[in-house]
């Protein structure tokens, strides 16, 4: 084995052999000596020191082959979903964004609570108790009644026990105006509706056709409820002939009296024609044909015909009338054409004698009351 002298004091290693690991070069004065590592560690004391890259053999060459710091950072870039394996499949399995789902997701769930919509896109939680759930899962009404403890029990009720039923039935009777068969006499009528009315309520109407005209005050007894007075639409006692046999009559109960309506009646006879209304009013008309009239002189030489009295076609209580002015009456005129106690009264006047003169046709009119 080769022996090496101890390193002189101040000897400093100046290079390492990276190809061999058993020796080192050391600078001693102005000389370089090759010293085994074992001798270096056993015979010398390491003195703290530093080296430059140039002092370390082959270090610069090793560094020259390395990538500079920071030059390997990833460049910014993008990829379509199709270039990312499995990404499109994952996206296809997601729920699309929805305002209702977002609102529901924001709710804080709790026991016995049920989400419900409070508006468009807004949701809240309602209480949903175990009892409520037990009722909701019932398959039919019978099961639900059993859950509620309200199973149906066969029973009956009277009309009085059903709120509003009697009033509804009364209203039906009122507007139905059942047709009644007539019995009794002309002035004491019994009416049978066939509806067996349990009571007569205000507004109840009954329709019937009289078998004979009444001759005066009349009563009606409907479905055996008792005879009650009848009155005209004006509240007057029925006058003679108010009830007609040729048309239907409608009577309405006002709570105390049967108010009897009457269709407008047309009367025509030799005395003209008239139209009678339920309220007692009438209109009448008559045509007085051309005819010869006697004459009488009066002061001033004016000749007047006798007063012609022409009855109305109906009896009347009050009346007022008029006559249409005639045309083609030579030197004559109508001086009277009103209604008197017995009918129309007509008088002609002329400045000449009426001998051989035929007065023209004239139209007479009247209005008044027949009861």
Image: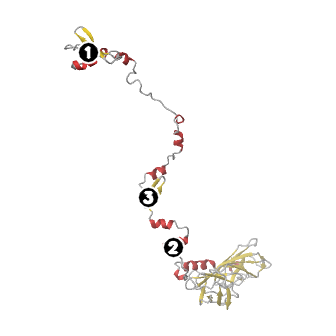
Q: Position of residue 257 (x, y in %)?
A: 57, 85
Q: In the image, is residue 216 above or below residue 323? A: below
Q: Residue at x 55, y 70 (%)?
A: 141
Query: In which quarter of the view is residue 178 placed?
Result: bottom right
Disc on res. 192: none
- Please indicate whether residue 77 sits to the left or right of residue 297 in the image: left
Quadrant of the image occupied by residue 308: bottom right
Asked if 113 appears above or below 58 in the picture, the reply is below
Question: Relative to residue 42, is residue 168 depicted above or below?
Answer: below
Q: Callout 1: helix, strand or loop? A: strand
Is residue 205 visible from the viewing direction of this image? yes
Work out whether residue 316 or residue 371 is closer to the camera in this orientation and state it. 371
Q: What residue is shown with label 1?
A: 13
Pick the residue in front: 45 or 39. 39
Q: Quadrant of the C terminus?
A: bottom right
Question: Looking at the picture, how far across and down is residue 345, in whole percent?
Answer: 69, 81
Tell me which numbered mark, 3 or 1, is placed earlier along the sequence: 1
Disc 3 crowd rating (10 Å Cα; few below 14, some 14-19, many 20+) is some
- In the rendered structure, the answer to whether residue 10 lies left or right of residue 188 reads left
What whole-number distance in Å separates the C-alpha atoms at marks 3 and 1?
A: 84 Å
What residue is pinned by disc 2?
146
Q: Quadrant of residue 306?
A: bottom right
Q: Are marks 2 and 3 in contact (CB under 8 Å)?
A: no
Pointer 3 residue: 125
| Badge 2 or badge 1: first in the primary sequence | 1
From the image, state whether disc 3 or disc 1 is nearer to you.
1
SS state under label 3: strand
Residue closest to the eye, 8 or 274: 8
Rendering coords of residue 13 (x, y %) = 26, 15
Residue beneath the point at 25% across and 8% down: 31
Report, in whole angstroms, how far the alpha carbon at label 2 lies from the one at label 1: 106 Å
């Amino acid at each position: 084995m080769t022996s090496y002298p101890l390193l002189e004091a101040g000897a400093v290693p100046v290079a390492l052999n990276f190809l061999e690991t058993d020796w080192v070069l050391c600078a001693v004065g102005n000389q370089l000596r090759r010293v085994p590592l074992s001798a270096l560690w056993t015979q010398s004391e390491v003195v703290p020191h530093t080296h430059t890259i140039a002092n370390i053999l082959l270090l610069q060459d090793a560094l020259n082959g390395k990538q500079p710091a920071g030059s390997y950072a990833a460049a910014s870039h993008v990829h379509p979903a199709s270039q990312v394996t499995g990404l499109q499949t994952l996206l296809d399995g997601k729920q699309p964004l929805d305002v209702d789902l977002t609102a529901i997701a924001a709710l804080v769930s709790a026991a016995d609570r049920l989400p419900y919509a409070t508006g468009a896109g807004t949701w809240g939680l309602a209480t949903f108790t175990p009892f409520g759930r037990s009722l909701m899962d019932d398959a039919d009404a019978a099961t639900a009644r059993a859950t509620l403890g309200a199973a149906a029990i066969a029973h009956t009720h009277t009309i009085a026990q059903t709120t509003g039923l009697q009033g509804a039935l009364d209203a039906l009777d009122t507007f139905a105006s059942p047709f009644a068969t007539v019995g009794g006499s002309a002035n004491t009528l019994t009416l049978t509706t066939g509806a067996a009315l349990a009571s007569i309520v205000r507004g109840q109407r009954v329709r019937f056709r009289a078998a004979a005209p009444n001759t005066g005050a009349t009563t009606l007894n409907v479905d055996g409820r008792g005879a009650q007075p009848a009155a005209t639409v004006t509240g007057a006692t029925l006058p003679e002939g108010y009830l007609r046999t040729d048309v239907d009559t409608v009577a309405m109960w006002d709570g105390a009296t049967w108010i009897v309506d009457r269709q407008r009646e047309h009367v025509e006879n030799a005395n003209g024609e008239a139209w009678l209304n339920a309220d007692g009013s009438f209109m009448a008309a008559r045509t007085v044909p051309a005819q010869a009239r006697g004459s009488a002189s009066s002061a001033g030489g004016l000749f007047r015909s006798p007063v012609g009295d022409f009855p109305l076609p109906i009896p009347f209580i009050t009346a007022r009338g008029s006559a249409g002015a005639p045309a083609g009456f030579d030197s004559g005129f109508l001086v009277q054409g009103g209604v008197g106690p017995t009918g129309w009264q007509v008088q002609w006047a002329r400045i000449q004698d009426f001998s051989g003169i035929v007065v023209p046709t004239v139209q007479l009119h009247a209005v008044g009351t027949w009861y």
